[in-house]
Image (cartoon, rainbow, N blue to C red):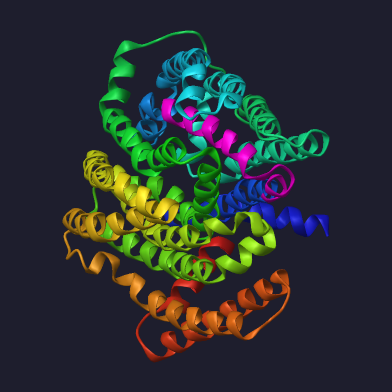
Amino acid sequence: MSRKLISIVRRLVPSGGTGQRAAKSAVWLFGQNMVDRLLPLVLLVILARLVGPLELGLVGIALVSMSALRSLTEVGLNEALIQRVEDNVDRYLNTVLAMEVARGVVIFGVLFLAAPFIGRLFDAPAAVPLVQVLGVSAVLRGLKNPAVVYFQKNLEYHKMFVYTTGGTLAFFFTGLAFALWDPSAWAWVGAFLAADVVRLVASYLIHDFRPGVGFDREAAGDLIHFGKWITGSSILYFLYNEGDDVFVGWLLSPVALAYYQYAYRMSNAPATELSQVIAGVMFPAFSKFQTDVVRLRESYLTTVRMVSFVAVPMGVGFAVVAPAFVTAAFGAEWLPMVVAMQLLALYGVYRALGKVMGALWKAVGRPDYITKTSFLKVLVIAVFIYPVTVRWGITGTALLVLAVNLLVSLPINLYITGKVLEMSGVRTISGATYPLVASAVMAGATWYVGQALVLPAWVELCAMVVTGGVVYAAAVLALDLGTNWGMRANLQQLVSSVVS
């Protein structure tokens, strides 16, 4: 048995051409994301039962404060190294370490000093020590071995799996121990720091590069020249992705913030985390084709078909089962977040496809597209967020986020992507057509089962999920046999690339 397992692992080590390396890397990244997202979500459900929305709202304030400073100081160093054509980027790594350490120290100092102000801003003085202690995380992250960038650049995701998953396991078990000993917001903060410590140690154990003390201004300039657009897009990404969190916490309450944040996390996890696997692998893969528009186009279209095949049914399906899921996992206390969760689940479908477009734009050296489109999105949300949140609470905020992405961002993104690939914008997303049809059939059947059954929440949820999976699989098979979709051929090619 052990020999078989070793043989399987060896066969999954990324090797061969770019397509085979990308396919095998996707397997590792899928496993990594499953662990990296599932365990924190399980811990979240446990904490939701033990401590309630108020304590998790305090955690949300600390996390959004950290995220704001990380976004303001993001200069896209990893992206710049991955996008570079040369395979060996050792000459940049000492400079990267120096910049990351400086960044971590600055974030910690600002958070420590600004914590009392943050507590007053959200009318939550209990959040002050949480913000200050969480700032240590920035220093720990800055000290990691910068050579871990090679795991992505060279599509060595088996090493990234070990690096990331080790921290996630530490996060889960430390948080669980804290929660059972002292169920409070500190369980989440302790888990966060434990993950950072384990990943810091692992970064030096897994890669043999040992950075030295030094700073090369020319190397820094090369990286920042590419990364300046990543900085802009990072800030704007925070504003449109978490700015609504800040607004909800400030205008409404920490409890409303907890509802909104965890509605977002839970609803987006199914659709976007799996697609993040593909998009994460495809950025370095697209980068290798950046000068060959024909291969780039073929690779992009195949990726969109695969992402849509996974993300569309998961987003639509989660929207249907959300009431049963919240009742079963969180309890009746959390039911006010259901409608917002359903709207954000649909937004997750768009977000999944948007990740593929973003990976493409960065790969061809145009991260400025991300920055410019994000700015427009932030501008529109800023205009309307106050009246809709005052009128409809977190449901209005979620509806605004969905509407802006579908009505404003999507048409522009399709036009830009079509221009990059030298094809019509509509064709760039045509791969989502069949999954949308199959998901509509699935949604109808799943909703009917939920309405027809009067069972305990967990049993009803399981019945709905099984029904959705079976109906979607049948709809996919029928569409593939009756049209030229070619999904079975894509899946067979993927499996062949992995096992070859």
Q: Nearer the viewer, residue 14 or 389?
A: 389
Q: Nearer the viewer, residue 490 or 414?
A: 414
Residue that sits furthest to the bottom in the current view: 482
Q: Residue 243, percent across and down?
A: 38, 39
- Total marks shown come to 0
Q: Is residue 375 left or right of residue 351?
A: left
Q: Residue at x 55, y 21 (%)?
A: 135
Q: Residue 87, percent across and down?
A: 40, 34
* One can see residue 62 in this view: yes
Which quadrant of the figure has residue 328? bottom right
**Secondary structure, magenta segment, majority class:** helix
Q: Nearer the viewer, residue 185 or 175?
A: 185
* One can see residue 363 in this view: no
Q: Is residue 263 left or right of residue 287?
A: right
Where 305 falls versus 464 (above or below)? Answer: above
Where 212 falls versus 271 (above or below)? Answer: above
Residue that sits furthest to the front in the current view: 391
Quarter of the image with the C terminus in it: bottom right
Q: Residue at x 23, y 38 (%)?
A: 368
Q: Is residue 57 part of the magenta span, yes or no? A: yes
Q: Residue 238, percent across and down?
A: 38, 37
Q: Residue at x 55, y 61 (%)?
A: 498
Q: Is residue 33 left or right of residue 181?
A: left
Q: Residue 157, percent across and down?
A: 55, 45
Where 300 falls versus 57 (above or below)? Answer: below
Q: Is residue 14 part of the magenta span, yes or no? A: no
Q: Magenta residues?
A: 45-69
